[in-house]
Amino acid sequence: MSLLSSDLMRQMDLTGPRYTSYPTADRFVEAFGQADYVQALEQRRAGLSRGSALSLYIHIPFCESLCYYCACNKIVTRHHDRAQVYLRQLSRELDLHLAHLGGGQVLSQLHLGGGTPTFLSDEELCSLLSMVRRGFQMVPGGEYSIEVDPRTATPKRLALLAQLGFNRLSLGVQDFDPAVQAAVHRRQPAELVFEQVAAARTLGFESVNVDLIYGLPMQTPESFERTLAQVVQLRPERVALYAYAHLPERFKPQRRIQAAQLPGAAARISMFERSLQAFEQAGYVYVGMDHFALPDDALAVARRQGRLHRNFQGYTTQPECDLIALGVSAIGRVGTTYSQNAKTLEEYYDLLDQGRLPVVRGLALSRDDLIRRSVIMALMCQGELQFEALETAFLIDFESYFAAELQALSVLQAQDLVRVGRTGLTVTAQGWFFVRAVAMVFDRYLQADRNRSRFSRII
C-alpha cells in the first residue's frame, strides 16, 4: 500500500494490547470474585439497563487435535462424552445467571468460541441452543456467530447451524501452505474450505470470516502471497489477519515450534505489506486492527457510518452492551465490571457444584479507567476523539487531564499517524493501520509497566 513506507513499518514493529477491553485482561485481580459479580448482575436487574440488549459468549474448550501456535484456553481430547458433562455444567451456570438477572433477557449478539465449538455433536449443538433460548430472546437481525474448524464441519452440519439461528461463520484457516500446516500441526486441504464457504453461501449465511496468521514457522513472503491469492479467490465477506505472537514461556503448545523456522522481522513486515496490497486490490476495506471486509458487509458499512464498536470478540456492529460469558475461562462485562471464570475444568466444575458462579478474577473499573476506556475505544472504533464530548461526559479538562499523553503524541504526530487540534484528535489514514500504537499512549497501566513482551506485535 503506497501510504505505508517500509521504514515506518519497521518503526511500528512493536508489541502491544489488542484492546478488546480497557483495562486489558492481564490487569484483572483475584480480589474481584463471585460476590462482586453478583452485585453487578443485581444492579443490572434493578437499574435502567435491565431492558437493554445483551451479548452472550459461550466458550467450548474441546479440540480433537493440538495446533502448536494456539494461545487459547483449550482441552485436547478425542473423548466426546466429556462434552455432555460440560453442557450440564453450562446449564447450571446459566441458571445461576438467570436467578440474578431474571428471565427473558433480550439477546442481540451470540458468539460460540473455543477451542472448537464444532467439537459438539449435532444433538449437543441443538441442546446448547435450546438452553440459550430458555434464558434469552434472540431478536431478529441479531449477530449470531460460531467459530468453525473446517476439519470438523460439513455442508450438512452448516445447514444445521443455519437452522439453529446462526447467521455468521468464522473459519480457522491460518495458512493454506502444506509445509506451514505441517509445522503447526494443522493439516486441512484448501478444497475443504472452499467447499464449506460455497455451502455457507447457498445456505444464506450473512457473513463468512476467514482467520489468517502471518509469522508462522516455514512461512515466507512468497508462500504467504500464494495463500492470500487463494483467500482472494475464496472471497469471504471478512478476513481477520493476525500476527503470530511466539510466547512459548506462556503457552506450552508453542514449545513444539522450532524458533529457527520462524520468519524474521523483515519477512513478517513483507507479509503484512503484501496482505494490505492483496486485499486492497481485491476491493476489501481495511476496517481496523486485523480486520478486512467487503464494502457491502455490515462491518465495513458500520466503519463508514461511524457505528463500529469493539468487545472481547473484536470489532462488531452491535451497540455497546453488557456481555454475559459462560464456560471455562470465559470473560464477561457487566456494568462497570469485567469478570473471568476459572481457567481449569476442575475448578470450574467444583465452583458450580457448590452452587457458586465460577468467577475467580475481574476488575471494578475506576473513574480513570472509564475515562481512558472511552478515549481508547473512540480511537479504536472511530479513529477520532472530540475533547468536548469527553469533557462533558466526565467533567474534566482534557488538556490538563491528558497533558503527558498529548506531549507523548508529538512523536506519532511527527510520523503523520495522528493529528492533534484544539478541539480533538484524529488518526490519519496511515495511522489507522497502527491505531494500537495511538491507543497505547492513553493506557495508564502500560505506561507504568514497560514489560510488553506478553503482547502480540502491532504488525
Image (tube, grey):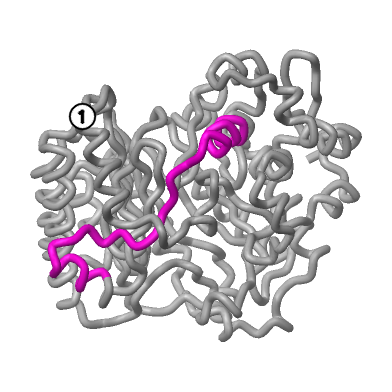
Residue 347 can be seen in this image:
yes
Residue 420: percent from left, percent from top: 80, 23
Name which quarter of the figure residue 58 lies in: bottom left
Question: Which structural element holds mark 1?
Answer: helix
Q: Who's the residue at 67% across and 54% down the image? A: 16
Horizontal side, residue 375 vs residue 206: left or right: right
Q: Who's the residue at 32% across and 45% down the image? A: 145
Residue 117: percent from left, percent from top: 29, 61
- Is residue 373 in the magenta section? yes
Residue 92: percent from left, percent from top: 12, 59
Image quadrant occupied by the N terminus: top right
Q: Who's the residue at 69% across and 19% down the image? A: 397
Residue 47: percent from left, percent from top: 25, 26
Q: Amino acid at mark 1?
A: Ala
Which residue in the structure is indicated by mark 1? 46
Q: Please provide the residue range marked out in magenta.
A: 348-376
Image quadrant occupied by the C terminus: bottom right
The foreground one among 53 and 205 is 53
Query: Taking 438 as reference, is 14 above or below it?
Result: below
Query: Taking 260 as reference, is 297 above or below it?
Result: above
Horizontal side, residue 387 vs residue 42: left or right: right
Label 1 neighbour load within 10 Å: few <14, some 14-19, many 20+:
few
Query: Taking 30 as reference, is 399 above or below it?
Result: above
Name which quarter of the figure residue 179 lies in: bottom right
- Is residue 216 in the magenta section? no
Q: Who's the residue at 31% across and 59% down the image? A: 359
